Image (tube, grey):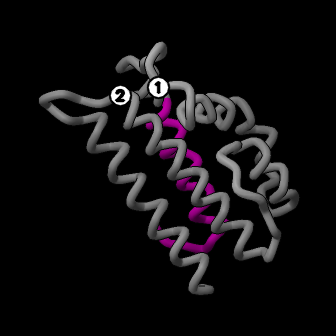
Amino acid sequence: MKKIVKEWVEKAEGDYQSAQRDYRARNYPNYDAAGFHAQQCIEKYLKALLQMKNIPFLKTHDLLKLSELSGKSFVEYELHKKDLAYLNQFAVLFRYPGESADKEKAKNAIGFMKNLRELLRAKLTIEK
């Protein structure tokens, strides 16, 4: 695995752990942060896939755009388009006053993250 791909995967895994920790916290769970880290996890896995395939990308948090760039590398894109769009809202929307994620929204984000993570790890040939 190329060094840059490995670095993206390591960063993604940090977000994976943070998302779950923020969601499951007994005292003061942070549902906004759980969703943010879920989105970041998938963003970084998509960027790892793009790096592995030598597909250039601009700085963006838009999971739909990143997925579209991956083309044949992520043929399941259409099947997961709604999940990616759902996670997109956590990149910015819930990070500022005026909007907050509740437990149900965070739970959905965590579920989408887990499913997409498994799929992307398989594409990157990373064992469970």
Going from N to C along the chain, the mark reached first, 2 or 1, is 2
On the image, numbered disc 1 is attached to which residue? 96
Three-letter residue code for mark 2: Tyr
Q: Residues within 10 Å of mark 1 (few under 14, many from 20)?
A: few
The residue at which mark 2 appears reads as: 31
Span of residues in magenta: 109-128
Q: Residues within 10 Å of mark 2 (few under 14, many from 20)?
A: many
Q: Residue at x 74, y 67 (%)?
A: 50
Is residue 11 within the magenta segment? no
Q: Quadrant of the C terminus?
A: bottom left
Picture layout, residue 70 above or below residue 99: below
Along the horizontal axis of the image, is 47 left or right of 64?
A: left
Dominant SS type (magenta): helix
* Image quarter of the N terminus: bottom right
In the rendered image, residue 70, in percent from the top left (x then y), is placed at 81, 59
Image height check: is 13 above or below 32? below
Query: Does residue 119 appear left or right of residue 27 in this picture?
Result: right
Q: Secondary structure at mark 2?
A: helix
Rounded to the nearest angstrom, the CA distance separating label 2 from label 1 is 13 Å
In the rendering, at what x and y percent does residue 61 appear? 65, 46
Residue at image coords 60%, 74%: 125
Determine the residue located farthest toward the right in the rendered image. 72
